[in-house]
């Protein structure tokens, strides 16, 4: 039994190599161009913001701790907005808590107290808590470190 062999001429082979090379080159140029334009075309949060929670996860007056890129963060939801702070106390690095009754951020280690702007209200912390930009889009909370 003979199999049908199809001979490829040298010219056809070179045509295929050239076309394949051109296709690979243009594909390699197209992907970076589309990746560059993608954030411009999007209507969501900026490309440098990352989702950290869903709006429904945090009740008004409540808070949630999250870890983003190795940083511990405290998200607080007031009646008007979401706020984000470092969850690491500026005194000796304990993890702070949210006190929903007093509407303050408390450090359990040495009774440091911060207000809703992250400013030190009382106790030994030498500096305010760092705060971060937040954006709420489509029921999701996005944050920029
Ligand atoms: S570590 Fe927070 S008050 Fe000391």
Image (tube, grey):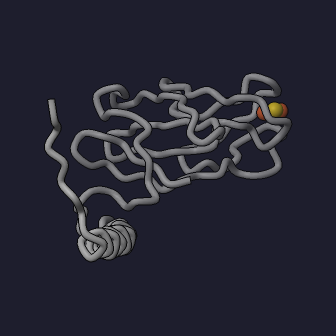
**Left-right relation of 92 to 95:** right
Compared with residue 143, is residue 3 higher up or lower down, i.e. above or below?
A: above
Closer to the camera, 133 or 61? Answer: 133
Q: Residue at x 42, y 27 (%)?
A: 62
Q: Residue at x 40, y 42 (%)?
A: 51
Q: Residue 25: name its quadrant.
A: bottom left
Closer to the camera, 64 or 113? Answer: 64
Q: Residue at x 65, y 40 (%)?
A: 71
Q: Residue 92: name its quadrant.
A: top right
Q: Is residue 3 visible?
A: yes
Q: Please provide percent x and percent y for residue 17.
A: 34, 70
Q: Please provide percent x and percent y for residue 129.
A: 67, 47
Compared with residue 130, is residue 97 higher up or lower down, i.e. above or below?
A: above
Q: Residue at x 22, y 44 (%)?
A: 138
Q: Residue furthest front?
A: 1
**Left-right relation of 42 to 143:** left
**Left-right relation of 27 to 6:** right
Q: Quadrant of the N terminus?
A: top left
Closer to the camera, 145 or 65? Answer: 145
**Left-right relation of 36 to 100:** left
Compared with residue 97, is residue 75 higher up or lower down, i.e. above or below?
A: below
Q: Quadrant of ligand 1?
A: top right
Closer to the camera, 135 or 45? Answer: 45
Q: Please provide percent x and percent y for residue 83.
A: 46, 46
Figure label count: 0
Q: Please provide percent x and percent y for residue 87.
A: 64, 36
Q: Is residue 30 visible?
A: no
């Amino acid at each position: 039994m003979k199999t049908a062999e199809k001979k490829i001429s040298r010219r056809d082979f070179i045509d295929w190599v050239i076309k394949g090379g051109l296709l690979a080159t243009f594909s390699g140029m197209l992907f970076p161009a589309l990746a560059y334009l993608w954030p411009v075309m999007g209507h969501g949060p900026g490309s440098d913001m990352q989702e950290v929670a869903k709006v429904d996860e945090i009740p008004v007056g409540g808070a949630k701790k999250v870890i983003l890129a190795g940083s511990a963060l405290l998200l607080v939801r007031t009646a008007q907005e979401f706020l984000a702070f470092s969850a690491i106390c500026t005194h000796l690095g304990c993890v702070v808590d949210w006190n929903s009754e007093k509407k303050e951020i408390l450090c359990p280690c040495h009774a440091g107290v911060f207000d809703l702007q992250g400013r030190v209200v009382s106790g030994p912390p030498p500096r305010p808590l760092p705060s971060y930009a937040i954006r709420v889009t489509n029921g999701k909370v996005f944050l920029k470190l």
